[in-house]
Amino acid sequence: MLCGLVVGLALALASQLRWAPARWAVAVYVDIIRNTPLLIQIFFIYFGLPLVLVKLPAFASGLLALTLYSAAYNAEVFRAGLEAVPNGQREAARSAGLSGWQQMRYVVLPQAVRIAFPALGNNLVSLVKNSSLVSAIGMVELMFVANDISFNNFRSFEIYGAAMIYYVIIILALSRALALVERRVVARAAI
Amino acid sequence: MQWHVVTESFGYLLAGARATLLLSATALLTGTGLGIVWGMLRVLPVPTLQRFMVGVIDGVRAVPLLLQMFFIFFGLPAVGVQMPVFVSAALAMTLWMAANLAEVMRGAVESIQRGQFEAGYSSGLGYAQVMRWIILPQALRRMLPPYVGLCTILIKDTSLAAIIGVFELTRAAQETIERTFRSFELYLTIGAMYFVLCFALTLLSRALERRVGEPDRILTH
C-alpha cells in the first residue's frame, strides 16, 4: 500500500507536467493497468517474466503486482484531487512569488490530498481484498492459509466460512477507522 | 520469444474469450436484476429493512470475490449444496454485482435533492409514484457511468473463475501454457484481449460521463 501510494502520487504529479509525453505515458500506463485483470498481471510477473527477464520470488511478485495495480488507481485519485483544487489557489501562490514546485508542495498538494482522502481509503480497502488473489501463486496470506487448512482436513465449509468472517471483520474495522480519520481531516480542512 | 505458439493456439484462446463473455453476460444479467431489487429495498424508508440491507450489502462487499467463489464451490457442498463450477462462479459474481450496484443506486438516489421528494409528496404523489416518475429517471442517468464501470470490473474479475476451474480465457491460456511453457507470450496476449474488451467499455463509460455531466466517480475495484 505504501509503495502504491508513493508511486501513485509520483504518477499523478507527472500527469500534471507541461511536458506532453509524460502525460501520455501516465495515461497509457493507467489505462493498461486498469483494463486488465489483476490476476493476469500477477501471473504475468510470476510465471511470464522469468522467460525473458528475471525470476522473482512469490512474495516479491505479489508485492510488485499489487504495487503497480494500486499505483494506477491511486494515480487517478490523486490526479482528480489535484485538478479539483481551484485554479485561483495556484494563481494566488504564484503572485505570492512561489516557484512551480513550491506552489505544488505548499499550496496545491495539501488540499488535493484532503480532497482525495475518501477515495484513497476505498482503494486501500480494495487492496486488502485484492491481496487474496496473490494466494493463486502461493504466497502465505490469509486466503492461502485457509486453503491449506481445508485441503488438510476437508472441513472446507467451516474454514472458508471463518476466512470470510475474518475478512468482514478486517474490512469493516478498516472502513470504520478510515471514516474516523476522514472526519478529522475534513474538520481540519474546514478550519 | 516464440510468438508462433500464440498464433497456433489462438482459436483455443478465442473459445476461452467466448466463455469469458458468456460468464460475464450471465452474471451481468442476474446481477443487475438482483442489484436493482436490493437497491430498491435499500432506499425504502423502512429503518429495520434498511439496516438489514446494509448488513447484506456490506457483508458481500467486504469479502473478496475469490473467497466467495471458494466458499460456494468448495464450502457449500459440505452442507449438502452442490453446484456445477460455472454456476458457482456465476452465483458469486451475481452477488458481487448486486451488492455493488445496490450501493451505486443508493448513492444516486441520495444525490437527488431532498426538495425533489418533498415537491413530489406535496403535489399528492405516493412513495411509489415519486420514485417512479421523479427520482428514478434522474437517478438512473447518474447511475449509468458507474454501472458501466462495474461491468468492466466484472469482465476483469471473471479471470478469478479460472482458479476454481471454470473454462474461460485465463483457463484457456493456462492450459496452453501447460502444453507449451510459453507463459510470457500467452499472458501478454490474453492481457491484450482483456484490455480490448474492457477498454471499449471504459471509453463508453467516459463518453456517458461527459454526456451526463457528472464528475468522475471513483469505484471499488
Image (cartoon, grey):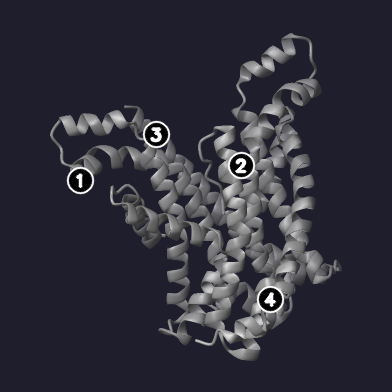
Instruction: Check the residue under mark 3 and report the chain it is in.
Output: A
- Whether marks 1 and 3 lie on the same chain: yes
Query: Nearer the N terminus, badge 1 or badge 3?
Result: 1
Instruction: Check the residue under mark 4 and report the chain it is in.
Output: B
How far across and down, in percent of the image, does residue A104 sit?
25, 42
Residue A186 is tagged as: 3
Mark 3 Cα-neighbour bin, 10 Å: few <14, some 14–19, many ≥20: some
Q: Secondary structure at mark 1?
A: helix
- The amino acid sitting under disc 1 is Trp
Q: Is residue B55 above or below residue A124?
A: above
Looking at the image, the residue that sits furthest to the top is: B123
- The amino acid sitting under disc 2 is Pro
For the point 76% across and 57% down, which residue is it? B25
Q: Are marks 4 and 2 in contact (CB under 8 Å)?
A: no
For the point 63% across and 60% down, which residue is it? B197
For the point 75% across and 47% down, which residue is it? B32
* Separation (CA) of disc 1 from disc 2: 35 Å
Residue on which the image places disc 1? A101
The quarter of the picture where the N terminus of chain A appears is: bottom left
- The amino acid sitting under disc 4 is Leu
Residue on which the image places disc 2? B145
For the point 63% across and 50% down, which residue is it? B150
